[in-house]
Image (tube, rainbow, N blue to C red):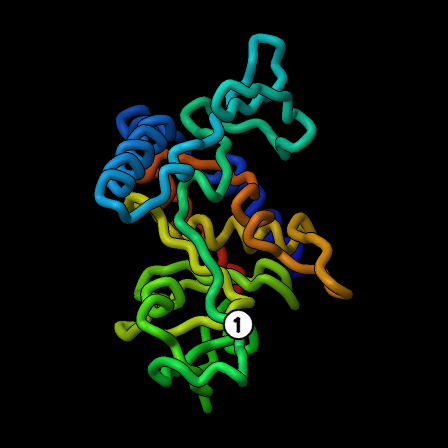
Amino acid sequence: MWHNLKKSILQEAIQGKLVPQIAEEGIAQDLLEQIRQEKQKLVKEGKLKKSALTDSVIYKGDDNKYYEQIDKENKEITEDILFDLPNKWQWCRIGTIFMHNNGKQLNKGNSKGKLMKYITTSNLYWDGFVLDNLKEMPFENNEIDRCMAVKGDLLVCEGGDIGRSCIWNYDFPIMLQNHIHKLRPYIPLCTKFFYYIFNLYNLAGLIGGKGIGIQGFSSKALHNTLVPLPPQKEQYRIVTQIEKLFEQLR
């Protein structure tokens, strides 16, 4: 029963039906423009590859079908859209709004670098992290920033319980093994809102992909995952309401 009630609350939330829309809070398109400008800035500073500027633009045509434009290519994606959104919201790809990458693959033959503690998917759960008896592996200087999670990063499991996620809310950083994706928004967003999207997608069986002998959630699959994007302040209001309702269910 708890499972079904939780799923229902998340469905209402992610479809924009849990809290009212407020005109003064702007539109999601404003956030996408801010993200575009931030990417241009990072490219100029040499901190981001120029290819990251090639984002998809998803829109609903006059024929009520959904389309995605990437550069000059335009294709219909109506079958990929899970539901219609409020007018102020926008469908987008995870890779459009988040920087993301995996951690480091464990290689016993590689002893170069600084020994640092790291977490694997066995340390990451929906309601927090288990940090007992963490192991160490060496990280070279050029791997540290890429494989390090800091406070506020959204971490997502690649395999096992596919899409299992949690936000790293500790004041100290932690290194990541390669079966964990690190997501960091290009501009300030309510990361907890997207955590709940992954929670719903997991409950609904919408996350998957085929690896070698197991299901997996590859970097490409993550990058292309479609998510709804509300205005920033609405993201926070939705999360507040979700957690209020969850508390009432306990």
Q: Where's residue 135, x and y in %?
A: 46, 87
Report whether residue 82 is seen: yes
The correct choice, above or below, for 217 with respect to 29 in the image is below
Q: Secondary structure at mark 1?
A: loop
Residue 74: horizontal and vertical position, in percent?
Answer: 57, 19
In the displayed structure, 104 sits above or below 244; it is below
| 135 on left or right of 213 | left
Residue 122 percent across, percent down from the top left: 56, 77
The quadrant where residue 75 appears: top right
Identified at 50% across, 32% down, the residue is: 91
182 or 196: nearer the eye? 182
Quadrant in which the N terminus is drawn: bottom right
- At label 1, counting other C-alpha atoms closer than 10 Å, the crowd grade (few under 14, some 14-19, many 20 or more) is few
Location of residue 211 (image quadrant):
bottom right
Q: Nearer the viewer, residue 244 or 86?
A: 86
Q: Residue at x 53, y 72 (%)?
A: 105
User: In this orientation, does residue 9 appear?
Assistant: no
Which residue is pictured at 37% across the width and 53% down the height?
A: 184
- All told, the count of numbered labels is 1
Left or right, 44 with reference to 176: left
Amino acid under disc 1: Gln
Q: Residue furthest top?
A: 62
Residue 111 location in percent, x, y?
44, 85
Identity of the residue furthest to the right in this view: 213
Which residue is nearer to you in this view: 20 or 101?
101
Q: Is residue 155 above or below residue 59?
A: below
Q: Which residue is mark 1?
A: 105
Query: What residue is drawn where x is 45% and y is 57%?
Result: 101
